[in-house]
Image: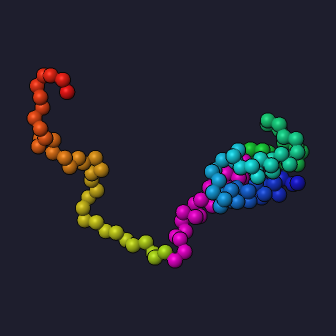
C-alpha cells in the first residue's frame, strides 16, 4: 500500500474511532493496531520502503479524531433552537461558588476545655 493511501486509511480509522465513542488513543483502537500490523515489518524508527512512517500514521489518526471532535462540538444538535444571547448587568463574582450561607455565630457556644 502506498504512503498516501496509508495516511488516508489512518485518518479514516481515526474518524471511525471518534464516532464509535473510542478515546483519542490510537494504541487502544484495535482496528488501527490491526492496520499497523498489516503494513509490513515495522520497527522502532524504521518503516518499510515506500510506506508512511508509523509516527505519521499515528499523527493522522489523532488529527482526524480531534477534527471530528471539534466539528461535532461546533455543530449544534439537529432541531435545537439557536443559542440565545444572555446579557447580564451584574459583574461575575469569582468566589460566589465558595459562599457559605451558614452563619456560624448562630450555632451553640463552644465549650471551653473538656473533650469534644
Q: Residue at x 80, y 49 (%)?
A: 34
Residue 85 in which image quadrant: bottom left
Give the farthest residue toward the front.
Answer: 115
Please name whichever residue, 24 or 62, is drawn nearer the observer in this view of the structure: 24
- State the image coordinates of residue 101 (x, y, percent, origin top left): 20, 49
Magenta: main secondary structure equals helix
87, above or below 57, in the image: below
Q: Is residue 75 left or right of residue 106?
A: right
Q: How many marks?
A: 0
Work out whether residue 67 can be spotted.
Answer: no
Residue 89 in which image quadrant: bottom left
Q: Is residue 90 left or right of residue 15?
A: left
Please name whichever residue, 55 or 39, is drawn nearer the observer in this view of the structure: 39
- State the image coordinates of residue 44 (x, y, percent, origin top left): 79, 35
- State the image coordinates of residue 104 (x, y, percent, origin top left): 15, 41
Q: Specify start and end residues of the magenta stretch as a single range.
A: 57-79
Residue 67 in which image quadrant: bottom right
Work out whether residue 102 can be spotted.
Answer: yes
Residue 66: in magenta span: yes
Amino acid at each position: 500500500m502506498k504512503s498516501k493511501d496509508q495516511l488516508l486509511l489512518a485518518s479514516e480509522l481515526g474518524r471511525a474511532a471518534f464516532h464509535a465513542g473510542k478515546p483519542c488513543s490510537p494504541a487502544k483502537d484495535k482496528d488501527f493496531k490491526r492496520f499497523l500490523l498489516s503494513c509490513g515489518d515495522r520497527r522502532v524508527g524504521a518503516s518499510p520502503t515506500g510506506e508512511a512512517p508509523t509516527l505519521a500514521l499515528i499523527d493522522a489518526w489523532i488529527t482526524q479524531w480531534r477534527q471530528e471532535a471539534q466539528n461535532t462540538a461546533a455543530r449544534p444538535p439537529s432541531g435545537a433552537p439557536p443559542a440565545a444571547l444572555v446579557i447580564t448587568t451584574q459583574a461575575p463574582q469569582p468566589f460566589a461558588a465558595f459562599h457559605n450561607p451558614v452563619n456560624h455565630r448562630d450555632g451553640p457556644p463552644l465549650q471551653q476545655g473538656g473533650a469534644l
